Amino acid sequence: MTRSEVKINLSAPAGKIRKINGGNLGPSMIANSEDHPYSDYGPDFAALNIPLTRLHDAPYENPGRRLVDIPQIFPNMDFDAEDPANYYFDHTDDYIKEILDCGTQVMYRLGVSIEHGRKRYWVDKPKDVKKYAAVCANIIRHLNYGKWNGHHYNIRYWEIWNEPENWDWEWENDLPVKRKLPRQFGGTIEEFNAFYCELASELKKLFPELKFGGPSHGSPRKYAADFLKYCKEHNAPLDFYSCHMYSDSVQKYKDLVIDVRKMMDDAGFQTAELHLNEWHYHPPRPSWFPQSDLKTKRKFLTRYYIESKGLDSAAMLCAVMTAWQDTPLDMGGYYTTGTASGYGLYNMFDPSPSYYGLKAYGEIVRYPERITCETAEPVYSLAGCNEQGEYAALISAYRTNTGTGAVHISFDTPVRVTQVELLDEHNELEKVYFEQCETGIDINYKGNSGVILIKFVKQ
């Protein structure tokens, strides 16, 4: 059994633990009743303690609901943008209220959800940007300023589009050879950059108090520099830049944030926030996958989606957000914190290990005064103190590949450990028995990865 060492130095403050544990999507709009309490995911979602929930792909986790997307609310751009009869708000109003009631704020994505079918229905680039801006403005007025029997939700972040560069590819010999169909924006990158600048400028003039940004590039290293340059040249507002990454590497997540921040600063957007608002654990696919037959592919992908929110995923989520503490990232956005779909936090009705990993991080941010931890990869640690003088530490052992592992936690100050919660192959972030010795505390976990949440006080 491999034993890792973690030393917690209560006498060495290290700034603040940052709430960068944003997410995508809230509880699915499943009717709850006394006969079906298992379908009420609101309390589970609230327990994640998420600071910001991005609304993208909402219709896919809520079949039959007209949610968030511009065409779902205003279905025909030939209609009169100033006639309230041409808008449908009810589903979106209720969806956002439920999310806000869980204690999180909202980032509203202006645009469309991703499309994967043989035909694409909503991805055409808007023909009349000023008309599009008028529709967006009325949605903002309805949700934030009470227009048309609306609300005062105080949504601060408004994101323009998602992954405008995302097209399907035709493949030959396992290599992409030709762009085929747009998944998000049916135009060129240059056309999108112009569209963003015009729309963002129109909306910022109307609502200078709100934050506008985007565009959630899926390949920021390839597309961010030109987008940022175009925005600067056209004096377009960019209160935040957003991008995505899917990987199984903690270091890659850390490096991307540093690289994109440099691009933003070099382009003159030093005060703009950086949001990596889609990310997820992606297990590596085997080399034989592209050449396998359809039946084999389907069987593999079934296991793949379960593994992508399994124990390794849970440990990586905590490790990444720990590593991000010392980067210039302003907000993350796990995809998804919803309760449905292959990327959601549940396996049918059962919370996945990823759910408990995010819950553990949501707990450590309740102890915001960060203190220094010493450890070595692949173990990551984050510790802090709250206003009541209580302490907590989050320890993630990510793919130690031992089958069984142990962590010895020591302290530079005498403490009394009051509680240990463990996430491993046998425990779902549950309280476990522990013995504290003179040198600290030893915690064993079963599996290649594990997450430990301990609470303690000074003696």
Image (cartoon, grey):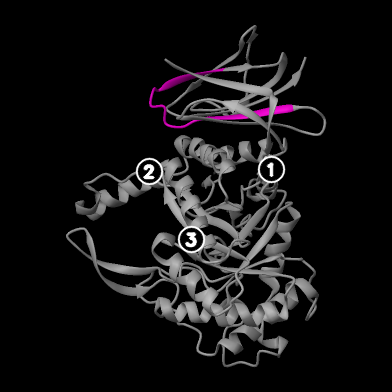
Q: Residues within 10 Å of mark 3 (few under 14, many from 20)?
A: some
Residue annotated with mark 1: 47
Extreme top residue here? 438
Residue 395, magenta (yes or no) = yes
> Does 383 sit above or below residue 265?
above
The secondary structure that dominates the magenta segment is: strand
Mark found first going from the N terminus, 2 or 3: 3
- Whether residue 343 can be seen here: no
Please provide the residue range marked out in magenta.
Answer: 391-408
> Does 380 sit above or below residue 348?
above
- Which disc is residue 283 wearing? 2
Please state if 256 lies on the left or on the right of 169 as rendered.
Answer: right
The amino acid type of the residue labelled 2 equals Pro
Label 3–label 1 contact, CB within 8 A: no
Name the quarter where the N terminus is drawn.
top left
Where residue 174 appears, as percent x and y from the top left, is: 21, 58
Q: Quadrant of residue 169?
A: bottom left
**Residue name at image x 44 percent, y 71 percent:** 226
The amino acid type of the residue labelled 1 equals Ala
- Which disc is residue 263 wearing? 3
**Residue name at image x 42 percent, y 67 percent:** 223
Secondary structure state at the residue bearing disc 2: loop
- Which disc is residue 327 wearing? none
Residue 30, magenta (yes or no) = no
**Residue name at image x 45 percent, y 54 percent:** 245
> Does 363 sit above or below residue 262?
above
